[in-house]
Amino acid sequence: MTEDLKEFDKLVREKKISEVDKMLEESKKLTEKIPDLKERHEKVVIARGNVVEASIKIEIAFDELITKTGGEDLVMNPEKKEFHLITGVKRENELGGLGFKSKVDIIRKIMKKVDDEFIYTGYLQSKEWEKKNKDFIDHFKKCNKCGNTEQLNSHHIRYENFGNENIKDVEVLCWCCGLGRKQEPIELINQPEPSLLKDLEKFVALRDIFAHVPVSWFAKELEFDENPRYNHFFKLDQKWRSVPLALNEFMNLQKEILDLILAYIKSIVLKRELLKIFFKY
Ligand SMILES: [Zn+2]
């Protein structure tokens, strides 16, 4: 022991600064009072491990979607002078700098876009739109670009009043001008969020609970700590204080999200095949 340490040791003994040994001893006495501590501790460790494992699976699926889909369709690659049927939102080398939450945000945008496109296509085939289309054609009477009066169709130029359009929201074009028209990206701000987005929000919240909130070993059942400093983790659902319940919900969400991602990938593959046929690619 160096002189300095000796001095410190003396100080500690005299002034009783360090109570570490005493604290350890007391906490040992305390833990002895907790029933089934070992079993419960093991359960929590396994639960946390499962949450991490399930999160990794979801993250891998997200990485796939972010790098291979969600970008634009039919984009020309100037270097290779060829069409990309569908591009990713990010390149693989950009993934490293993204945390889980930024990835979730990107996925939210991709899913909202898919949902909007689906709603939009359905709407264009509805009786409702059929009537509106006719009304707009009757109003404008000719093609907005070339003045042709045959084979007219209405096209959205903005989506703010989607489902409730007036003459400011559309333009009427003939078949030929309609073909060459570049469509505004579909963004339906007045539509409800797709259910997957709610699932993602819950998934991230539960993941955070397992990552940051300690377990209260003195609770009768397996429960997360009731310390008010952790309250914000449970603002979506107070029932998640129960570890088994939170784990169960988390695993169900993970399954649901993976299923939805699979359905999304199938739709992308289908779209790619259709584009291939269309462009004899
Ligand atoms: Zn025209």
Image: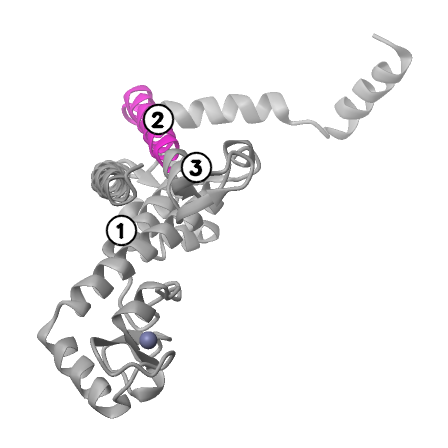
Residue at horizontal 13%, vertical 82%?
131
Residue 7 or 100: which is nearer the viewer? 100
10 Å crowding of disc 2: few (<14), some (14-19), many (20+): few
Task: Point out residue 24 in the picture as x, y percentages from the top left corner.
Answer: 54, 23
In this rendering, would 233 be left or right of 247? right
Question: In whole angstroms, how far apart are the C-alphas of marks 2 and 3?
Answer: 21 Å
Marks 2, 3: nearer the viewer:
3
Question: In the picture shown, does residue 131 fall above or below 87?
Answer: below
Is residue 201 within the magenta segment? no
Say whether marks 3 and 1 touch (CB < 8 Å): no
* Position of the C terminus by quadrant: top left
Task: Point out residue 133 in the picture as x, y percentages from the top left corner.
Answer: 19, 80
Q: Secondary structure at mark 2?
A: helix
Q: Amino acid at mark 2?
A: Glu
Q: Amino acid at mark 1?
A: Leu
Q: Which residue is label 3 attached to?
A: 67
Which residue range is magenta in the image?
A: 33-62
Farthest residue in the bottom direction? 139
Q: Amino acid at mark 3?
A: Thr
Q: Which residue is label 1 attached to?
A: 196
Farthest residue in the top direction? 1
10 Å crowding of disc 3: few (<14), some (14-19), many (20+): some
In this rendering, would 98 be left or right of 213? right
Q: Secondary structure at mark 1?
A: helix
Q: Secondary structure at mark 3?
A: helix
Question: In whole angstroms, how far apart are the C-alphas of marks 3 and 1?
Answer: 20 Å
Question: In the picture shown, does residue 260 fall above or below 4?
Answer: below
Question: In whole angstroms, how far apart are the C-alphas of marks 2 and 1?
Answer: 20 Å
Task: Point out residue 208 in the picture as x, y percentages from the top left corner.
Answer: 42, 42
Marks 2, 1: nearer the viewer:
1
Name the mark on residue 128. Answer: none
Sequence-wise first label, 2 or 3: 2
